[in-house]
């Protein structure tokens, strides 16, 4: 980068370090494609509002216990380079940063995050299986394939490949869970092999009653020798237990016999727990989860689908959505179809539509464009955090429009009987996972277009109500000029007439008591005010708002003696003179209360001194 750019980025870095609470508050820094990510010792020390107004920043939010500042592709790399040099936080990878952030999570968040991490390593295999299953379904229904030996053979091999991956998925889950929780991965594989041992009755056949099941008696308990095909929850639990057993025995067994005894005890105790406790518990938990979802689809109908997709992105805000991966895997194992994937996908798409709605409402604001366009592009690839935290949650009404739009998308999923054959990818890439049965691909597109349009339109509708309570008669005189002023970015102070300046008023008794006859200037002002008002007053009792004087009074508002003000964003105005505040716009000062008695006392004292 040239020296001019470096100096600009250095100024940004110095200001940013100050706004996040100082260099001592920074634990780590990394960046992704568009965002600078910072882990802070204390997030409360960060001034998010001021960071939003930072030069070149397009938005800021906190997610995953990381402060994330949107700069945009390419630019973020240069800002990161200068910022890390300035703060001395170079050479930290995104993985390292996430490790630092995880240390700040509460126990529940850490458990849920760890469970989601289990599926990251095996996700390529799951996606491959899902895509192969979809491809097999498409090819099997083609007459050209049925009439050609080679194409039929290829289709058959594709079907075998996809079935094998899903068939051994519990083994992969046990391996990944054991690895994630600190155990030796090979022991997770061993436990997965025990779960799928051919010496056990096939779980699917046992459920249909087509195979004889042997029952053992251990410690007075009847143990059925049934395999754990499709037992994703059981595999997840066993991976965790195996890891903990491995760590325990590695620590307790003497070193001289550790190599032989530790894995022996881990496998033996793990197998006993599998058949006596973890297996039955996991099967029961999986049955409850799958049964609950199936019940929802059969009994709640379109309402159940709409409710889930309408609220799903609120779960994302809490960070608890990572648990859905395990539920989806179990649903696939039990039913062969994943209804959650398209429901979550349309929920994401609706939030993207809400971003476009907000962009349309503020299309003349360049900073809004810089914030919304990258956020929407992220949504197309199933990443909604920039849209949620950068736009929709910040401005509230787009979140409402997006949630309602998600519910409408969920209804389309219900009516088209849409489902996925895998999980792990959504929105545009997710179409590859759609079940092709019943025009699945076409229905996938229709549901997502409906969700996008609903989120867009409903955000525009909700935005009208969002502004309805803020009116200002002065703005009606020249709405375009007022909006140009608010859009200009120059230092501004808004002193509203209605609700604020109108409270600075004077009555006839006050004029007569404190000004009339006191000196020539005071006497003239009192007489002029009384004569002017009584020309239109409807009775002997009246007050007169002294609107224009409040502007001069603000210039003398030392220490906010006369007026209370706050820093807020410049408002946007609708066609009827109503206005509302959007946090992504330039900042200004806004007077929200006048200390009437203090200001009137000061005015009278100054007039009497004249």
Image (spheres, rainbow, N blue to C red):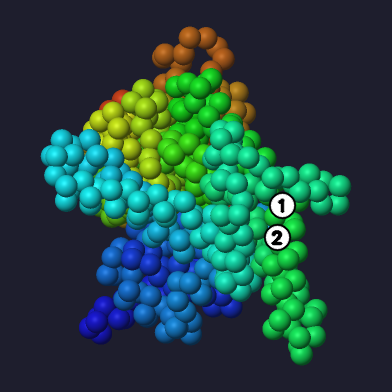
Q: Secondary structure at mark 2?
A: helix
- At a point 80% along the width and 79% down the height, the residue shown is 252
Q: Nearer the viewer, residue 211 or 308?
A: 211
Label ID, residue 275: 1
Question: Residue 563 lies in what quarter of the image?
Answer: top right
The outermost residue toward the front is 212
> Alpha-carbon neighbours of circle 1 within 10 Å: few (<14), some, or many (≥20)?
some
Q: How many marks?
A: 2
Q: Which residue is mark 2?
A: 271
In the image, residue 424 sits, relative to residue 211, either above or below, namely below
In the image, residue 542 sits, relative to residue 603, either above or below, namely above
Using the rendered image of the protein, determine whether residue 424 is visible from the camera's viewpoint. Answer: no
Residue 523 is situated, as x and y percent measured from the top left of the image, at: 50, 32
Residue 236 is situated, as x and y percent measured from the top left of the image, at: 60, 55
- At a point 51% along the width and 75% down the height, the residue shown is 96
Contact between marks 2 and 1 (CB within 8 A): the answer is: yes
């Amino acid at each position: 980068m040239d020296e001019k750019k470096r100096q600009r980025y250095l100024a940004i870095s110095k200001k940013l370090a100050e706004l996040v609470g100082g260099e001592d508050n920074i634990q780590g820094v990394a960046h992704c494609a568009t965002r600078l990510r910072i882990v802070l010792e204390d997030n409360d020390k960060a001034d998010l509002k001021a960071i939003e107004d930072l030069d070149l920043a397009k938005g800021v939010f906190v997610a995953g216990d990381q402060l994330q500042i949107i700069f945009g592709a390419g630019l973020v790399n240069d800002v990161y380079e200068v910022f890390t040099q300035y703060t001395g936080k170079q050479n930290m990878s995104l993985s390292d940063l996430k490790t630092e952030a995880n240390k700040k999570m509460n126990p529940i968040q850490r458990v849920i995050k760890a469970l989601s991490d289990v599926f990251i390593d095996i996700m390529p295999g799951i996606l491959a299986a899902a895509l192969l299953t979809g491809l097999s379904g498409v090819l099997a229904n083609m007459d050209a394939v049925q009439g050609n030996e080679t194409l039929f053979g290829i289709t058959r091999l594709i079907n075998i490949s996809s079935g094998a991956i899903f068939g051994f998925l519990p083994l992969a889950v046990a391996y990944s869970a054991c690895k994630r929780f600190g155990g030796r991965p090979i022991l997770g594989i061993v436990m997965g092999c025990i779960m799928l041992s051919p010496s056990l009755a096939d779980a699917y056949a046992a459920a249909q009653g087509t195979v004889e099941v042997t029952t053992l008696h251990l410690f007075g308990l009847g143990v059925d020798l049934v395999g754990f095909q499709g037992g994703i929850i059981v595999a997840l639990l066993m991976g965790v237990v195996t890891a903990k057993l491995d760590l325990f025995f590695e620590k307790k067994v003497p070193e001289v016999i550790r190599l032989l005894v530790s894995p022996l005890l881990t496998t033996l105790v793990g197998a006993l727990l599998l058949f006596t406790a973890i297996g039955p518990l996991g099967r029961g938990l999986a049955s409850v989860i799958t049964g609950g979802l199936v019940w929802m689809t059969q009994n709640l109908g379109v309402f159940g689908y709409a409710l889930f997709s309408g609220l799903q992105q609120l779960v994302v805000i809490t960070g608890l959505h990572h648990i859905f991966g395990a539920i989806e895997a179990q649903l696939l194992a039990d039913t062969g179809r994943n209804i959650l994937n398209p429901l979550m996908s349309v929920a994401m798409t609706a939030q993207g539509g809400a971003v476009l709605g907000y962009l349309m409402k503020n299309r003349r604001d360049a900073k809004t464009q810089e914030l919304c366009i990258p956020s929407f592009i992220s949504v197309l690839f199933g990443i909604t955090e920039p849209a949620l935290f950068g736009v929709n949650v910040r401005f509230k009404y787009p979140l409402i429009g997006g949630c309602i739009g998600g519910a409408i998308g969920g209804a389309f999923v219900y009516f088209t009987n849409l489902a996925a054959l895998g999980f792990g990818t959504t929105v545009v890439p997710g179409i590859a996972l759609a079940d092709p049965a019943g025009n699945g691909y076409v229905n996938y597109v229709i549901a997502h277009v409906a969700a996008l349009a609903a989120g867009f339109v409903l955000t525009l509708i909700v935005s009208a109500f969002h502004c309805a309570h803020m009116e200002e008669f002065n703005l009606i005189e020249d709405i375009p000029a007022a909006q140009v002023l608010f859009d200009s970015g120059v230092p501004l102070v808004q002193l509203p007439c209605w609700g604020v300046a109108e409270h600075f008023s004077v009555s006839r008794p006050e004029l007569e008591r404190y000004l009339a006859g006191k000196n020539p200037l005071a006497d003239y002002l009192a007489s002029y005010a009384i004569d002017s008002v009584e020309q239109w007053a409807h009775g002997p009792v009246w007050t007169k708002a002294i609107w224009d004087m409040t502007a001069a009074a603000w210039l003398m508002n030392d220490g906010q003696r006369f007026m209370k003000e706050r820093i807020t964003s410049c408002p946007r105005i609708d066609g009827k003179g109503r206005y509302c505040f959007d946090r992504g716009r330039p900042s200004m000062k806004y007077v929200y209360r006048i200390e009437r008695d203090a200001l009137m006392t000061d005015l009278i004292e100054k007039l009497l001194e004249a």
